[in-house]
């Protein structure tokens, strides 16, 4: 937040506004569906209205340096991490202390810890390996000799890092903290894999409507539009895996790598967020057991929504290039 008047403890963590405009029915901050710019949306009679956040201060005579003005700036930045913000909501953690404002499951931590365990064990043999197969991970981690090798790796790494005190405990602590951060990458990786449902749904729809030229051509267009952003996502995950693939470097440049993982966590989260609503619609249509898609109004409405989403966000005129983030120094 800007210098000058500083908010009290509550306003340091929550969107607590003074101006009455923020008490309007349905007031919330979102990214505009048309411009993708931060706006405040609210009910106006029977309709929804929205005002761009960069115009809100002028429209309602709000001093940008006031508490409300500072919180508006925070809300605009917060929409990078959450889909909507309502007055009274907590400020996303990413803006406060760098941690994530969303949760992952215990299984994601276990996967991250298992991958680091494999890196520790294979590092000792000079053939450090990054394993992505969950089945292979379970086999290696479940091997009775793995635990002994991990403790040996702790001692060897502590010696390389010239640590003092309880060196094994310090190395184990760093590995655990890395696993906690990488758990978010695993949670996002799982989310990315769910996008295959959309791709598979389009393949099925193509077969269903193969005799209808217009529908078939629109589906082919959707399949084409899907390819660059999904390939870009896969490349971003590959970049994270490559950058976090050397356990000794990860532990030696510990703080820098924690910062890097968080940076990529936020980057991947922002790439995946726009897909969430569409993915939920495909999941609702197909259900958990992935029953066959049926030709009909429900599928056609979803295809129309999918087409609009892809055409608006991922037209072929857009350039999809992997963000070249420099590795930690």
Image: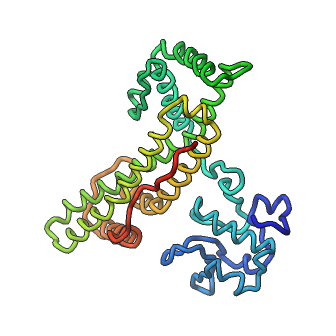
Residue 24 occupies quadrant? bottom right
Classify 126 as above or below 41. above
Asked if 298 appears above or below 108 in the picture, the reply is below
Q: Position of residue 14 (x, y in %)?
A: 75, 61
Q: Report the front residue among 315 and 309.
A: 315
Please name the residue shown 48% across and 12% down the image: 145
Residue at 49% over, 41% down: 186
Quadrant for residue 131, please give it: top left
Residue 30 as seen in the image, left or right of residue 189? right
Point 65% across, 54% down: residue: 94
Q: How has the structure been colored for display?
A: rainbow
Front residue of this view, candidates 242 and 216: 242
Mark count: 0
State the residue in front, 55 or 239.
Answer: 239
The residue positioned 36% from the left and 67% from the top of the image is: 306
Residue 20 image position (x, y, % from top left)? 77, 80
For the N terminus, give its image quadrant.
bottom right
- Give the left or right position of residue 215, taking residue 189 as reference: left
Query: Is residue 229 left or right of 158 when viewed as pictured?
Result: left
Q: Position of residue 163 (x, y in %)?
A: 68, 23
Q: Residue furthest left?
A: 211
Q: Is 260 placed above or below 204 here?
A: above
Which of the image's four quarters has the C terminus? top right
* x and y percentages locating residue 113 in the rendered image: 54, 30
């Amino acid at each position: 937040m800007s210098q000058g008047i500083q908010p009290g403890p509550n306003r340091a963590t929550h969107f607590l506004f003074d101006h009455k405009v923020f008490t309007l029915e349905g007031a919330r901050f979102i990214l505009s569906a048309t411009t993708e710019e931060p706006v405040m949306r609210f009910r106006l009679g029977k309709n929804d209205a929205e005002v761009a956040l960069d115009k809100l201060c002028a429209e309602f005579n709000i001093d940008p340096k006031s508490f409300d003005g500072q919180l508006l700036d925070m809300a605009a930045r917060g929409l990078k991490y959450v889909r909507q913000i309502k007055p009274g909501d907590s400020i996303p953690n990413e803006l406060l202390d760098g941690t994530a404002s969303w949760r992952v499951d215990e299984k994601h931590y276990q996967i991250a810890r298992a991958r680091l365990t494999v890196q520790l064990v294979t590092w000792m043999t000079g053939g450090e390996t990054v394993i992505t197969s969950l089945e292979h991970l379970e086999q290696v981690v479940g091997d009775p000799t793995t635990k002994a090798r991990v403790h040996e790796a702790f001692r060897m790494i502590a010696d390389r890092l010239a640590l003092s005190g309880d060196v094994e405990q310090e190395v184990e602590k760093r590995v655990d903290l890395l696993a906690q951060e990488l758990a978010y990458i695993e949670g996002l990786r799982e989310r990315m894999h769910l996008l295959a449902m959309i791709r598979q749904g389009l393949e099925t729809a193509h077969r269903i409507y193969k005799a209808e030229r217009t529908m078939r051509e629109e589906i082919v267009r959707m399949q084409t539009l899907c390819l660059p952003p999904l390939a870009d996502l896969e490349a971003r995950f590959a970049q994270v895996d490559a950058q976090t693939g050397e356990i000794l470097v990860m532990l030696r440049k510990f703080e820098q790598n924690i910062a890097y993982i968080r940076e990529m966590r936020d980057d991947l989260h922002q790439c995946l967020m726009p897909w969430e609503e569409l993915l939920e619609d495909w999941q609702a249509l197909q259900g958990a057991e992935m029953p066959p898609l049926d030709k009909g109004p429900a599928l056609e409405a979803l295809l129309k929504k999918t087409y609009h989403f892809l055409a608006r966000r991922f037209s072929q005129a857009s350039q999809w290039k992997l963000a070249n983030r420099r590795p930690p120094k």
